[in-house]
Image: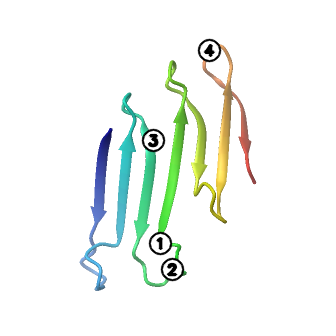
Amino acid sequence: MRYAYLSLKSVVLISASPHQHELLCTYDIHGNVSTLVQENTNPLLPTGQNLKRIDYDYDLISGKVNDVHYQNKQADAFHHHYEYDADNRILTVYTSK
């Protein structure tokens, strides 16, 4: 499994944290992003809202995205499910909200 990390630092805002935004990605064996976690250190965010996670599920043969899960099993969860035709074109997208 591969990992990628991005940190955004601000020279304008002064805070106790060394960064304002971070992205952490994990990749599956095919190089697809499997999980993306975003951290926002803005002190104005409500408690517990600084981390957001998105998980991706892919078709192993075609590599197309089957499902996207935003904040799975959390109060602000949101899900997408994709269906494709024989030529791998999107036919239908289902959402949870």
Kindly report the distance in space between the C-alpha atoms of the residues bearing marks 4 and 3.
24 Å
Q: Amino acid at mark 4?
A: Asp
Q: Is residue 55 above or below residue 48?
A: above
Query: Of the residues under marks 3 and 2, which one precedes in the sequence?
Result: 3
Query: Of the residues under marks 4 and 1, which one precedes in the sequence?
Result: 1
Q: Amino acid at mark 1?
A: Asn
Of tags 4 and 3, which is closer to the observer?
Answer: 3
Of tags 3 and 2, which is closer to the observer?
Answer: 3
Q: Position of residue 84 (x, y in %)?
A: 66, 24
Q: Is residue 21 above or below residue 61?
A: below
Relative horizontal placement of residue 74, taking residue 53 as reference (left or right): right
Query: Of the residues under marks 1 and 3, which one precedes in the sequence?
Result: 3
Q: Position of residue 19 (x, y in %)?
A: 29, 72
Secondary structure state at the residue bearing disc 3: strand
Kindly report the distance in space between the C-alpha atoms of the residues bearing marks 4 and 2.
43 Å
Which disc, if any, is residue 50? 1
Q: Which residue is mark 2?
A: 45
Q: Which residue is mark 4?
A: 87
Q: Are marks 2 and 1 in contact (CB under 8 Å)?
A: yes
Give the quadrant of residue 37.
Answer: bottom left
Secondary structure state at the residue bearing disc 1: loop
Q: Residues within 10 Å of mark 1 (few under 14, many from 20)?
A: some
